[in-house]
Image (tube, rainbow, N blue to C red):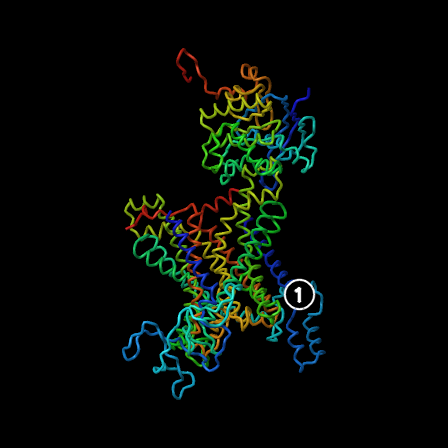
């Protein structure tokens, strides 16, 4: 069976200004390949600056890669033009790291969640409100918060809102770009569990981007490690965690906080 | 260095852009100097046509523009139909008169604004500062037209100052001292109007810049060391606050030719302003273009001058530029 | 909170000032074109409550002026006849806000004309002319500012959103406009257009010319806002749902520019009113018989008027309260949006 998402040799260059007369190109992605079967979670782990966000934007069709291919459900997305891509984008949704900037702070929660319907011109206005409220229920945001402005919500609630919005158009795959990194520890756990539960009930596929190996290990079926624009290691989560081969993987694993479980006590080593 | 070359090129671009724009505009709009003549029954249509041909108004636009550019390259700026003389000498005389006025006014305004602003910042929130703030606010609210007219009426009713012109009749026969006195009296009113118009904004900016700097730790340290107030203010605070003020000064220089148009017209000062107005009304094309370009040159030069000053005065800009 | 009150205070002040001018017909005792050739250049009349021989009247009154013996322009009060002021009196017909016809004026007099601010060469009441003239000048300023802001917003958004060569081109043109001294540009633009047109056409020309001169600065500011908003994630997210450019501009970017545009408006309107006054003063603006604050001042260019008839200067003062209102509003708005504040209390004093 073909994977839901397949990326082949993706390259993305950015022009980064001039130095001594020649144009300097920044290679954010230097030949990235990966694939995600339907219903699974691939965790993409790497340090800041390794190109993870660029990859997320390319897959979500918000940036055009310099070269390479992206296949979504067998369709070559990179070969489509702007209008065709616009039709496809709702199926690949993105949840950003900082909900303070990914949600328009002046809009109410209800408006934010119903925006996808508005943009796609689905449903009538009252219908949109009904569906939006259902989405809020799904992510456990109390209905009375629906009329509040986004900047009045807590960090965890904001991120739930972002997830609810991402679910609105019933996407096949959700890319979570460091979606938990800006949250407190306890909130992270809550949202992670929400994500797992949604995946179970809705059959979602996740591309989970993070620099936190522990989180990746917790959520993912497969892990791919990214370093300086390349995938340097990938495989099932257990394998990568137990026997890392590349230096980058090893340093990321070493950076994880370890907990030694002694009876009744959790000690940080 | 590359930075300044870029700025110079930019200025040249502006020059071409503005002159082209003005030429284009004059071609697209109806009417020219000779339309008025055509209405005059005493001048035959053939004579009008001959004059037009003489001034090449019947040639297509690009050719006229090219001719004009050529003339400018040789230091000439076209011909004035109304004054029947080349434009350049006309402009220089008037520009000189304007500069006399504005340079004096600008100098005076800055000489007043700096101490007033600094003292105000040093006594922030206290009585002298509040009085000054209130005064500047009041002056700001009175537009220059109102100010100029008001001063004029004052002059007329008190008779202390002459109400127009550069010099009195019989100026040439005066002794040197009398000449100076006469000129000063004639300048007094327009200069006052200009100073009153520009002073409030300057004082505000100086006050804001210096006040912002006074907060800095390095000044508190200086005071802690026992440095006297005037040394702190003049030697340290002023230098730190200088950047925005230098830009402002450049802007002041830039508006030397163009900022006094209204005052000159109201006070009948024979400067660039009234000339421009007349020429516009008479559709004297080349004078208008020449005048606009001249003041634009000053504007651009003023900005460039500010940039050079900043480069010289602020070591941070120098190191940043050489690090590139 | 204090800022909120300042803001509201000045907003109310401006509303009242504009309201007075809008209802000029009510506040003005006479029609502005009504001439009285027998009373040219009347000085402002004094309103008394107490007659010369000590008789106190509850209702204010005035003495009509008559020519002094042997003089042709010196007036004196005619102490014999005291003409009382009537309030809410019926006078010339006018249209409130241009729609509702009415004959009620705030004050007037029955047997003689009251010239609170004097009269001009044709005996027209200056107070009425100032009030009606305000309508023209203020409208020109408001409309001109509207055009400029619309142009500036449109160009700024196009340049900022689409970027690339369009942005470069538009910003170069903006720099060109910024490099020109605006007063010169104003005159040149206006004067190169037909000069002898009807008052209405002249007014429209003035508005259009004023509007077209000042778009560069608002455009640059709007462009700055657009550039920063364009990169925000919520705009990206909306694109992720398939939003079109127009949707993004209209729903996300435009609201962010609102505060910049508002602040610009409070600065531009008084400047543009002044621009109209300047143009009309120099003969390039609204012509007679329509009155505007500018052309009311034009008579001051005659030396004899300047010397003898000082009340012809009063129209110049009419703009001052408006300047005060707008500039204070601008400063209140600026305080609200600016991040830098000089903390008054902790100000370190050098003494």
Q: Residue at x 42, y 49 (%)?
A: C335
Whether residue A70 is situated above or below residue A1 in the rendered picture: below
Q: Is residue C107 above or below residue A177?
A: below
- Residue C351 seen in the current view: yes
Q: Residue at x 62, y 30 (%)?
A: A92
Residue A65: quadrant of the picture: top right
Looking at the image, the residue that sits furthest to the top is A263
Q: Position of residue A185 (x, y in %)?
A: 45, 25
Where is A110 relative to B277, above or below?
A: above
Along the line of sight, the residue nearer the viewer: C237 or A28? C237
Q: Residue furthest bottom?
A: C70
Position of residue C339 measured from the top left corner of the image (x, y, whole percent)? 43, 45
| Total numbered circles | 1
Q: Quadrant of residue B108?
A: bottom left
Residue C166's spot in the image, x, y percent?
63, 48
The residue under label 1 is: B27
Horizontally, is B313 left or right of B88 in the view? left
């Amino acid at each position: 069976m073909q994977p839901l998402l397949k990326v082949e040799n993706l390259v993305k260059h950015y022009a980064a200004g001039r130095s001594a007369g020649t144009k300097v190109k920044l290679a954010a992605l230097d030949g990235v390949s990966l694939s995600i079967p339907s219903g699974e979670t691939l965790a993409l782990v790497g340090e800041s600056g390794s190109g993870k966000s660029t990859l997320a934007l390319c897959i979500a069709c918000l940036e055009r890669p310099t070269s390479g291919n992206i296949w979504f459900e067998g369709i070559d997305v990179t070969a489509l033009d702007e209008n065709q891509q616009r039709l496809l984008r709702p199926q690949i949704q993105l949840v950003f790291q900082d909900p303070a900037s990914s949600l328009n702070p002046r809009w109410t929660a209800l408006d934010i969640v119903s925006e996808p319907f508005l943009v796609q011109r689905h449903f009538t206005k009252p219908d949109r409100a009904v569906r939006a409220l259902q989405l809020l229920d799904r992510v456990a945001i109390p209905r009375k918060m629906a009329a509040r402005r986004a900047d009045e919500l807590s960090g965890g609630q904001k991120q739930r809102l972002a997830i609810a919005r991402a679910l609105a158009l019933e996407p096949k795959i959700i890319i979570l770009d460091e979606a938990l990194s800006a949250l407190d520890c306890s909130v992270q756990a809550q949202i992670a569990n929400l994500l797992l539960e949604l995946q179970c009930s809705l059959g979602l596929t996740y591309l989970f981007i993070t620099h936190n190996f522990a989180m990746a290990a917790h959520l993912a079926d497969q892990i791919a490690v990214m370093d300086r624009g390349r995938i340097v290691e990938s495989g099932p989560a257990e394998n990568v965690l137990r026997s890392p081969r590349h230096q980058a993987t090893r340093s990321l694993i070493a950076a994880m906080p370890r907990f030694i479980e002694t009876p009744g006590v959790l000690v940080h080593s | 260095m590359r930075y300044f070359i870029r700025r110079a090129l930019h200025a040249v671009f502006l020059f071409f852009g503005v002159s082209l724009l003005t030429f284009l505009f004059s071609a697209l709009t109806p009417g020219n100097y000779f339309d008025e003549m055509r209405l005059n029954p005493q001048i035959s249509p053939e004579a009008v046509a001959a004059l037009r041909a003489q001034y090449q108004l019947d040639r297509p636009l690009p050719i006229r523009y090219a001719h004009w550019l050529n003339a400018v390259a040789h230091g000439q700026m076209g011909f004035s139909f109304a004054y029947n003389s080349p434009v350049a000498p006309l402009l220089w005389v008037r520009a000189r008169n304007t500069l006399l006025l504005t340079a004096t006014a600008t100098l005076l305004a800055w000489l007043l604004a700096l101490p007033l602003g600094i003292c105000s910042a040093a006594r922030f929130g206290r009585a002298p500062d509040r009085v000054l703030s209130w005064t500047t606010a009041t002056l700001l609210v009175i537009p220059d037209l109102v100010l100029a007219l008001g001063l004029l009426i004052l002059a007329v009713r008190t008779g202390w100052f002459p109400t127009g012109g550069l010099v009195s009749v019989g100026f040439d026969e005066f002794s040197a001292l009398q000449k100076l006195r006469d000129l000063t009296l004639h300048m007094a009113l327009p200069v006052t109007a200009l100073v009153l118009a520009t002073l409030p904004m300057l004082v505000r900016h100086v006050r804001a810049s210096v006040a912002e700097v006074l907060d800095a730790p390095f000044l508190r340290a200086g005071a802690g060391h026992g440095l006297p107030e005037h040394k702190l203010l003049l030697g340290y605070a002023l230098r730190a606050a200088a950047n925005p003020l230098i830009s402002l000064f450049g802007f002041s220089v830039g508006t030397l030719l163009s900022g006094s148009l209204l005052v000159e017209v109201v006070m009948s000062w024979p400067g660039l302003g009234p000339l421009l107005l007349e020429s516009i009304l008479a559709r004297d094309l080349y004078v208008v273009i020449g005048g606009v370009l001249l003041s634009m040159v000053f504007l651009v030069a003023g900005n460039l001058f500010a940039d050079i000053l900043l480069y010289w005065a602020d070591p941070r800009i120098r190191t940043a530029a050489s690090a590139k | 909170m204090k800022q909120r009150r300042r803001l509201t205070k000045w907003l109310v002040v401006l509303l009242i000032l504009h309201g007075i001018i809008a209802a000029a017909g009510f506040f003005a005792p006479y029609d502005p074109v009504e001439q009285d050739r027998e009373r040219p250049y009347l000085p402002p009349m004094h309103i008394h409550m107490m007659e010369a021989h000590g008789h106190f009247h509850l209702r204010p009154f005035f003495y009509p002026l008559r020519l002094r013996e042997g003089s042709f322009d010196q007036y004196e009060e005619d102490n014999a006849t005291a003409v009382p002021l009537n309030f809410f009196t019926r006078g010339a017909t006018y249209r409130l806000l241009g729609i509702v016809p009415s004959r009620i004026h705030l004050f007037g007099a029955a047997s003689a004309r009251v010239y609170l601010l004097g009269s001009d060469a044709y005996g027209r009441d200056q107070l009425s002319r100032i009030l009606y003239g305000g309508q023209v000048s203020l409208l020109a300023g408001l409309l001109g500012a509207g055009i400029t802001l619309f142009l500036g917003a449109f160009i700024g958004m196009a340049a900022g959103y689409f970027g690339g060569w369009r942005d470069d081109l538009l910003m170069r043109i903006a720099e060109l406009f910024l490099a020109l001294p605006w007063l010169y540009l104003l005159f040149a633009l206006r004067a190169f257009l037909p000069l002898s047109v009807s008052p209405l056409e002249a007014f429209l020309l003035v508005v259009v010319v004023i509007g077209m001169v000042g778009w560069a600065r608002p455009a640059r500011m709007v462009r700055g806002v657009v550039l920063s908003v364009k990169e925000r994630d919520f705009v990206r997210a909306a694109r992720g749902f398939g939003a079109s450019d127009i949707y993004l501009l209209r729903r996300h970017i435009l609201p962010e520019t609102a505060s910049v545009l508002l602040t610009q408006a409070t600065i531009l309107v008084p400047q543009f009113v002044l621009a109209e006054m300047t143009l009309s003063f120099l003969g390039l603006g609204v012509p007679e018989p329509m009155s505007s604050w500018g052309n009311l001042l034009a008579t001051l260019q005659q030396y004899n008027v300047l010397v003898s008839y000082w009340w012809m200067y009063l129209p110049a003062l009419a703009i001052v309260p408006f300047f005060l209102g707008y500039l204070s509003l601008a400063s209140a708005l600026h305080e609200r949006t600016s991040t830098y504040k000089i903390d008054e209390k902790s100000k370190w004093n050098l003494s």
